[in-house]
Image (cartoon, helix red, strand yellow):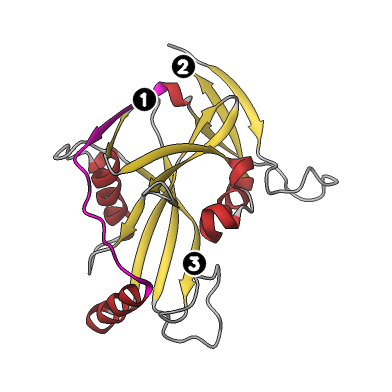
Amino acid sequence: MQGEEVTVRNHAAAGGGGDGGGDDQARAMDIYPLSSYYFGSKDALALREETLADRVQRMKSHYAAHGLRTCVEAVIVVELFRHPHLLLLQVRNSTFQLPGGRLRPGESDVEGLKRKLTSKLSANGAGDETQWEIGECLGMWWRPDFETLLYPYLPPNIKKPKECTKLFLVKLPVSRKFIVPKNLKLLAVPLCQIHENLKTYGPIIAGVPQLLSKFSFNIIDS
């Protein structure tokens, strides 16, 4: 069915329109209503129960064996109430995550993200890695050492960072099934609620609306 197209400018992080100087033509991105997608559940994922000290030790062991740890995460946008919403996973009813995870040694960014999305958002054994459309890298965050926070830049004095997190735009089709582990919740959160809300979502997720400010959203009514 031919849908109605509505263009919504994303000013959540851009700070308004400006005086028209330069090329301010935003890039268009089609998004579809949340109601276009089917949501189900599957067996729970095994989640680590560890302290901060345990996590630091695990990162040190990984770095000693494989070097820089790379994580890939998906930025997936849908429409709800005529506003762009970001899909987030909630863990243990407390922390929020973008869908994704750590790469295996030698694994490419795209293949690793497809594997993680299938693991967390598709039916077990669905084998639909090829159905995920991985777009551009929107941003990168760096962990200079094992105990510091991630930064959206690599400090020039750091020659051997310990972790890199890359955010990729993932474009959804008009319809698909999301099958989520029972111990995770998949939530659609409005960009206006996420923007600069570091206390609730952390710096990476809170910065996503700003990364998306270069796009205009075409809301496609199915």
- Percent from the top left, x then y, of residue 133? 36, 41
Report if the CB atoms under discs 2 and 1 are less than 8 Å apart. Answer: yes
- Percent from the top left, x then y, of residue 157? 54, 88
Report if the CB atoms under discs 3 and 1 are less than 8 Å apart. Answer: no
- Percent from the top left, x then y, of residue 220? 52, 22
Q: Work out whether 10 lies above or below 222.
A: below
Q: Work out whether 166 lies above or below 119.
A: below
Identify the residue position indicated by label 2 in the image.
Answer: 222
Q: The disc labelled 3 sits on which kind of residue?
A: Trp
Q: Give the range drawn in magenta.
A: 36-52
Tag 2 secondary structure: loop
Q: The disc labelled 1 sits on which kind of residue?
A: Ser
Identify the residue position indicated by label 3 in the image.
Answer: 141
Question: Which of the two discs, 3 and 2, sits closer to the camera?
Answer: 3
In the picture provided, is 172 more to the left or to the right than 85? Answer: left
Identify the residue position indicated by label 1 in the image.
Answer: 175
